[in-house]
């Protein structure tokens, strides 16, 4: 069970409205990611759900019950913090057992659940260490372990991977996804990294300045961004957003075309340009092409084999099937 | 981060400390104010009626008042300057690699544990006494006339005694601050060609500013009310009468509580001026 | 009035009667002087005689004074017996803060107390504190140095002789100072000395209208003489020397003469502490031909604060500690030279005691001091080296601080006298005398 | 990180630092020496003092004359009692200031510190009279209360700076884990703040141990701590250096030894969190 509904939830700090009245429905077992630039209110939203902040207006329903006034501990949610928030004076075992101890479970049951969680998270050998003696990834797993043992209605993750290095991050990402599949419990995950959002989420909530810009599956967002903000935010490298005469040609104020939807050629194409910096990733190569027709350079994705000299003349052809059109307000034109 | 619930809980939890201190401040403060407008002579039967501002004018017009204010500020200032200056040097020294650092640190912090009366007595008798004092023997050993510390160099002597007591405090805080300095910063400065002095001036000193602030603030609070050291050494003679000591004389030696209370009000005003001044200079450094 | 004193006596009697049955525990505040510390050591004798136990609060003189004054003025009741002096007793007695000692037992023999002492510890003829020991001041001098200087100390020298002798005895190379005198600030230290000295120069603190007299010639003469002599023949740093500093200088053989409390005689003649014990002579404090000597009169005495619950036991203690029996007890343990002096007439009639070299001179000194008539010109106050008014301690401490600054060379005599004059008048005004 | 230092340089550092350390420590060392001398020897020239006979007489005299242990226990009770009581009051206050800060927090802290600037002597009479009325005069509990109040601002401030170093997320984690306010303070906050609380404790024990004005003026026979004990050895008649030294050593030794043993915690305490 882990169905969370937000109804007209609002949060103000003094005069500043950080979350505008907002509705959101999270179904049981869903993996929902809140994504947005820093300061967009995604963490605040998570903390409102957790009960660590009071809402200024609206209601939070958990499994159909109004939980707006329920203290955090009673909401049946577990949270994994950005800094892991492990108790430094307790061993790993005690850390993981802490919520169980608070719930008043007997010692045997506590041990059983801790051992189980440790097995799942590969922490069995570290149970008697202190958090200070663990690596970043291990600490991360302890924090998750502490969340799992409670068997919560939903997990809340607040940028849990931002303190890990790149390689570990990919690994942990997989582990969390794996965990979700196995437990099929609702998870709400906050990140500013759209790659995490795309790879993990069942449903992405894009937030900007306290307002939901779009809600949808990763592919929905990729295919049909509702506005230029979402278009620019989702996808890597980011979508090329072009204005001016070329946009007008397509009956829009702005057109967007993703780097992977442009064909590059030395001979023929619609737009002419010169090659700027090229980034070789092996599997792919990203070219930054300066076109006289546009103010900003275009990013173009090509196969890993292609090699072009700096300053070489190239021709580009957009795939019109994947062209996104936006009006003057930045809203998508279907 | 704060929920309504925790905010009201916070208020309740703060209440005992705030109420206690408020009481500890208000009761004596009101009493002091009350007495300061009275002719109150315990040896003549106590309360002899209201006298308006007479005590205030009398206290200020006394020939001892301004010298006492000056003495107070000189002692506070002198001790602050000495302890901070020597404290920085000592901290730099103790930060160097050496054998037995722990023991040296123990030696250096020891004076902080000595009660002010004892340190006053020990310095006065065993060291500064012009006949039997250790320093007198030292001076004589070098063929010099012993210095009559507490009479002819009373203020420097007093400042020295008090500095001896507070130097460990300053040194420890500054030492910890220096040890927390990122060595990469120093190395970077070295690569940039900064001399030892510039490294000190532009890297170490700014890094110490917060620690120096703490030393300033805490020491000032304690030094403004310094009493025992003066009581046992000079008893306020030879120009060492601080405002606190002058109040002591008025209240306990002359048994004029009204006059002393008026002095107390002046002392509070002086303390607040100093505090305001301090907060202005150092406040930025304290994210209290 | 009469009824009240009858009632008071009645309660006192009943308390004494009651206390015989109940062993009490009394708290005594005292000063850390040698005689008191000895008394502390002999407490067991009191306990075994009466069953009462004693707790001692022994403090340095200034701390003690501050402590007991706070307690008496607030009726704190922290102490059952306080050790106070001739200065406090009449003032506190007049305020009704002390239990009158008018019903002491027959065998205690109140009349044996030296009249000078009893007078100084009474108010309106009622005794408020019993003297533990009494003192005046006198000259203690080194007979060997005097001889070496080719001089002979008269029984009753003048200041000019003292100054001359001091100069003759001074031998800076051998660290011998002709004269050691108190210069330390504090009304009970240098303040007491200079006041007593000024009496012989014709000075006084106040005229009959309570005006300060520091602008008069006798004061200037006193200070000029004192400073002149001390600069010629005094020890270095005399501005911070009090009783104790001078005592140790004299004991180490660094002083030719020392004018100070008569009780010091037993210390300087005690071979355990003094390197010059067998060459000390005594003489009356000097005069200046004006009819007044420069010796003072003082007693450390035991008093009971009014309101104590243990009046009976406290009285028993006072009777024990200031009795002739106590004197004999000390004599049997420590020898006659170490008994508390100056309190009882009978002591000076005791042939054993009169063999002590300083006994007669102490008595003569005490007898030559008259607290009621201490100055050449008439003064409104009682007291030799002090004026028995509540404000005096504070004023005299500040005045003596100004004087000590002169001794330390920090200001001139005129400056000091001017400041002393101003601050004294100011304080007297504040207290409502003028 | 640390580069190799030549032995020569290290030797110079060592010599220099030891010299400075010994000079600063010397007065304490010297009274320690004097306390083992006879009165007559104690006033001799320094070299003669060292070569003269050593004796325990002064300690015997002091012990004989005053009940050291009574004063010692009073000091311990008063210092420890006032500190513990202070911490009891200060922990909740510092907790709320550190974790639920408001615009007034800084002002309240500064105000608390400013109460330490009131001149004590000015209010001796009112406090003394109050103590008589409440029956607190010459009781340890009275001194415990007064010293607690005197040191409370420092205790609050120190604890506040330690608590502020504890990440708020950990407390939130505890809250999410089902801990109530009581459990949060008991199981998470307090254990984490133990080093800070320990150094606060130490520093305040020292401050309370050495406080001389109130402990002297509000006690008589029963509750008098070591400050009063010292007041009976300063400037009596006759030679007193050896006795004063012995008494001083006895008065400062307990706190000195405690301070040395807990040096590390104390250093942390003295910094008031000024340096991380």
Image (cartoon, coloured by chain):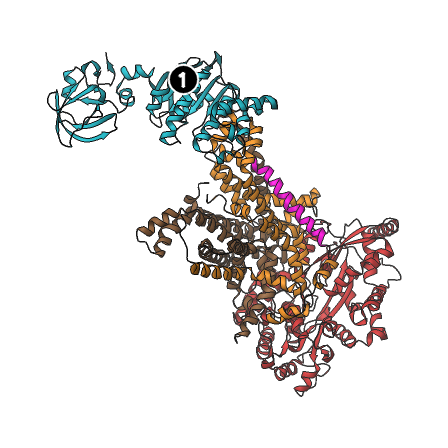
Chain colours: A cyan, B brown, C red, D orange
Q: Is residue A225 visible?
A: no
Residue C399, placed above or below residue D140 = below
> The magenta stretch spans which residues?
D67-91
Left or right: C105 as drawn, with respect to A253? right
- Of residues A229 and D130, the one drawn nearer to the viewer in this rendering: A229
State the image coordinates of residue C189 (x, y, percent, origin top left): 65, 67
State the image coordinates of residue C313 (x, y, percent, origin top left): 83, 53
| Crowd class of label 1 (few under 14; some 14 to 19; many from 20; radius 10 Å) | many
- Of residues B164 and C197, the one drawn nearer to the viewer in this rendering: B164
Q: Would you name the residue on which mark 1 appears? A: A31
Residue A87, placed above or below residue B161 = above
The local secondary structure at tag 1 comes to: strand
Most distant residue in the bottom direction: C150
Question: Hey, which quadrant is residue A220 in on the image?
Answer: top left
State the image coordinates of residue D74 (x, y, percent, origin top left): 69, 48
State the image coordinates of residue B136 (x, y, percent, origin top left): 56, 71
Residue drawn at x 48%, y 62% as measured from the top left: D15
Q: Is residue C160 visible?
A: yes
Left or right: C349 as drawn, with respect to A248? right
Most distant residue in the left direction: A267
Q: Main secondary structure of the magenta part?
A: helix
Mark 1 falls within which chain? Answer: A
**Is residue C114 inside the magenta stretch?**
no
- Of residues A296 and C149, the one drawn nearer to the viewer in this rendering: A296
């Amino acid at each position: 069970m882990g169905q969370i509904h937000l109804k007209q939830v609002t949060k103000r700090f003094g005069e500043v409205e950080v979350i505008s009245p907002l509705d959101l429905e999270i179904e049981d077992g869903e993996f929902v990611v809140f994504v947005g630039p820093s300061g967009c209110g995604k963490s605040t939203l998570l903390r409102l759900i957790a009960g660590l902040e009071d809402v200024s207006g609206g209601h939070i329903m958990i499994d159909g019950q109004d939980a707006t006034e329920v203290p955090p501990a009673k909401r049946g949610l577990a949270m994994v913090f950005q800094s892991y928030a492990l108790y430094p004076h307790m061993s790993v075992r005690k850390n993981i057992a802490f919520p169980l101890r608070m719930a008043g479970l007997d010692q045997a049951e506590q041990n059983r659940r801790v051992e189980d969680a440790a097995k799942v998270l590969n922490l069995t050998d570290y149970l008697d260490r202190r958090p200070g003696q663990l690596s970043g990834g291990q600490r991360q797993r302890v924090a998750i372990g502490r969340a799992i043992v409670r068997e919560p209605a939903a997990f809340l993750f607040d940028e849990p991977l931002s303190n890990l290095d790149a390689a570990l991050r990919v690994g942990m990402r997989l582990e969390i996804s794996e965990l979700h599949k196995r437990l099929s419990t609702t998870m709400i995950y906050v990140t500013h990294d759209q790659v995490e959002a795309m790879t993990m989420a069942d449903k992405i909530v894009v937030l900007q300045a306290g307002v939901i810009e779009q809600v949808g599956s990763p592919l929905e967002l990729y295919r049909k961004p509702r506005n230029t903000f979402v278009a620019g935010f989702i996808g890597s490298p980011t979508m090329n957003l072009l204005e001016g005469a070329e946009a007008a040609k397509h009956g829009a104020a702005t057109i967007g075309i993703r780097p992977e939807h442009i064909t590059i050629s030395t001979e023929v194409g619609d737009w002419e340009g010169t090659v700027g910096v090229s980034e070789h990733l092996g599997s792919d190569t990203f070219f930054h092409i300066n076109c006289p027709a546009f103010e900003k350079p275009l990013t173009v994705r090509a196969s890993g084999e292609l090699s072009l000299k700096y300053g070489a003349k190239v021709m580009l052809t957009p795939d019109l099937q994947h062209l996104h059109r936006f009006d003057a307000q930045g809203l998508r034109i279907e | 981060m704060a929920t309504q619930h925790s905010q009201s809980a916070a208020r309740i939890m703060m209440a005992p400390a705030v109420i206690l201190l408020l009481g500890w401040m208000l009761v004596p403060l009101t009493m002091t104010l009350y007495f300061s407008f009275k002719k109150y002579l315990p040896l003549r039967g106590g309360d002899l009626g209201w006298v308006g501002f007479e005590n205030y004018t009398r206290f200020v017009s006394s020939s001892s008042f301004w010298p006492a204010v000056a003495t107070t500020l000189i002692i506070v200032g002198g001790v602050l300057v000495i302890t901070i200056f020597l404290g920085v040097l000592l901290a730099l020294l103790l930060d160097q690699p050496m054998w037995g650092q722990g023991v040296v640190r123990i030696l250096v912090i020891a004076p902080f544990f000595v009660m002010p009366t004892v340190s006053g007595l020990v310095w006065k008798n065993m060291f500064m006494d012009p006949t039997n004092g250790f320093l007198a023997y030292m001076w004589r050993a070098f063929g010099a006339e012993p210095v009559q510390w507490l009479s002819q160099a009373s203020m420097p002597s007093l400042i020295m005694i008090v500095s001896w007591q507070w130097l460990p405090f300053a040194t420890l805080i500054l030492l910890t601050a220096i040890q927390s300095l990122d060595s990469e910063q120093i190395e970077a400065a070295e690569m940039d060609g900064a001399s030892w002095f510039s490294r000190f001036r532009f890297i170490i000193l700014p890094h110490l500013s917060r620690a120096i602030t703490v030393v300033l603030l805490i020491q000032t609070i304690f030094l403004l009310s310094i009493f025992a050291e003066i009581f046992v050494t000079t008893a306020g003679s030879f120009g060492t009468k601080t405002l606190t000591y002058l109040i002591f004389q008025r209240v306990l030696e002359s048994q004029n509580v009204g006059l002393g209370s008026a002095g107390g009000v002046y002392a509070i005003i002086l303390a607040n001026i100093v505090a305001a001044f301090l907060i202005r200079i150092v406040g930025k450094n304290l994210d209290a | 009035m009469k009824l009240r004193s009858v009632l008071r006596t009645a309660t006192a009697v009943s308390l004494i009667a009651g206390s015989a049955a109940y062993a009490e525990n009394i708290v005594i505040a005292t000063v850390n002087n040698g005689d008191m510390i000895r008394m502390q050591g002999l407490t067991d004798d009191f306990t075994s005689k009466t069953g009462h136990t004693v707790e001692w609060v022994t403090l340095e003189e200034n701390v003690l004074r501050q402590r007991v004054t706070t307690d008496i003025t607030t009726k704190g009741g922290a102490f059952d017996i306080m050790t106070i002096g001739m200065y406090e007793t009449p003032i506190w007695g007049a305020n009704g803060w002390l239990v009158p000692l008018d019903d002491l037992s027959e065998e205690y023999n109140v009349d044996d107390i030296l009249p000078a002492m009893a007078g100084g510890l009474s108010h309106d003829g009622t005794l408020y504190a019993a003297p533990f020991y009494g003192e005046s001041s006198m000259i203690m001098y080194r007979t060997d140095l005097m001889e070496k200087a080719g001089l002979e100390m008269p029984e009753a020298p003048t200041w000019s002789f003292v100054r001359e002798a001091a100069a003759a005895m001074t031998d800076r190379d051998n660290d011998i100072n002709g004269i050691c005198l108190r210069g330390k600030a504090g009304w009970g230290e240098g303040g007491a000395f200079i006041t007593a000295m000024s009496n012989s120069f014709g000075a006084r603190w106040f005229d009959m209208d309570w005006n300060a007299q520091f602008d008069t010639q006798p004061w200037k003469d006193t200070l000029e003489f004192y400073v002149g002599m001390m600069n010629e023949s005094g020890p270095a740093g005399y501005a911070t020397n009090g009783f104790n500093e001078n005592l140790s200088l004299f004991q180490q053989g660094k002083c030719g003469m020392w004018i100070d409390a008569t009780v010091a005689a037993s210390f300087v003649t005690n071979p355990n502490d003094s390197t010059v014990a067998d060459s000390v002579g005594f003489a009356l404090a000097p005069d200046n031909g004006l009819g007044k000597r420069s010796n003072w009169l003082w007693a450390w005495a035991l008093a009971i604060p009014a309101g104590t619950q243990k009046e009976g036991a406290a009285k028993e203690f006072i009777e024990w500690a200031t009795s002739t029996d106590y004197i004999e007890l000390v004599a049997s343990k420590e020898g006659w030279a170490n008994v508390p002096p100056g309190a009882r007439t009978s002591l000076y009639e005791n042939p054993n005691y009169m063999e002590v070299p300083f006994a007669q001179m102490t008595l003569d000194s005490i007898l030559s001091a008259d607290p009621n008539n201490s100055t050449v010109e008439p003064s409104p106050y009682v007291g030799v080296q002090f004026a028995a008014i509540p404000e005096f301690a504070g004023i005299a401490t500040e005045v003596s601080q100004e004087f000590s600054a002169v001794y330390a060379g920090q200001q001139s005599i005129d400056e000091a006298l001017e400041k002393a004059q101003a601050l004294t008048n100011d304080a007297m005004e504040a207290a409502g005398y003028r | 990180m640390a580069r190799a230092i030549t032995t020569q340089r290290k030797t110079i550092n060592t010599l220099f630092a030891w010299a400075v350390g010994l000079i600063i420590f010397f007065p304490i060392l010297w009274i320690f020496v004097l306390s083992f001398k006879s009165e007559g020897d104690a006033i001799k020239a320094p070299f003669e003092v060292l070569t003269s006979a050593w004796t325990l007489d002064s300690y015997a005299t002091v012990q004989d004359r005053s009940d050291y242990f009574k004063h010692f226990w009073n000091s311990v009770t008063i210092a420890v009692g006032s500190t513990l009581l202070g911490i009891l009051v200060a922990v909740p206050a510092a907790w709320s200031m550190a974790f639920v800060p408001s615009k007034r927090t800084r002002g309240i802290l500064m105000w608390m510190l400013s109460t330490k600037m009131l001149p004590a002597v000015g209010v001796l009479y009112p406090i003394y009279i109050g103590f008589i009325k409440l029956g607190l005069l010459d009781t340890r509990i009275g001194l415990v209360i007064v010293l607690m109040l005197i040191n409370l601002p420092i205790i609050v401030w120190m604890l506040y700076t330690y608590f502020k170093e504890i990440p708020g997320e950990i407390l939130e984690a505890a809250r999410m884990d089902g801990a109530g306010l009581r459990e949060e303070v008991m199981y998470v906050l307090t254990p984490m703040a133990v080093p800070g609380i320990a150094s606060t404790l130490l520093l305040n024990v020292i401050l309370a141990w050495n406080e001389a004005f109130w402990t002297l003026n509000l006690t008589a026979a029963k509750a008098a701590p070591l400050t009063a004990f010292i007041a009976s050895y300063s400037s009596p008649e006759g030679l007193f250096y050896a006795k004063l030294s012995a008494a001083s050593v006895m008065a400062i030794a307990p706190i000195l030894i405690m301070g040395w043993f807990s040096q590390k915690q104390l250093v942390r305490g003295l910094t008031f969190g000024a340096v991380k």
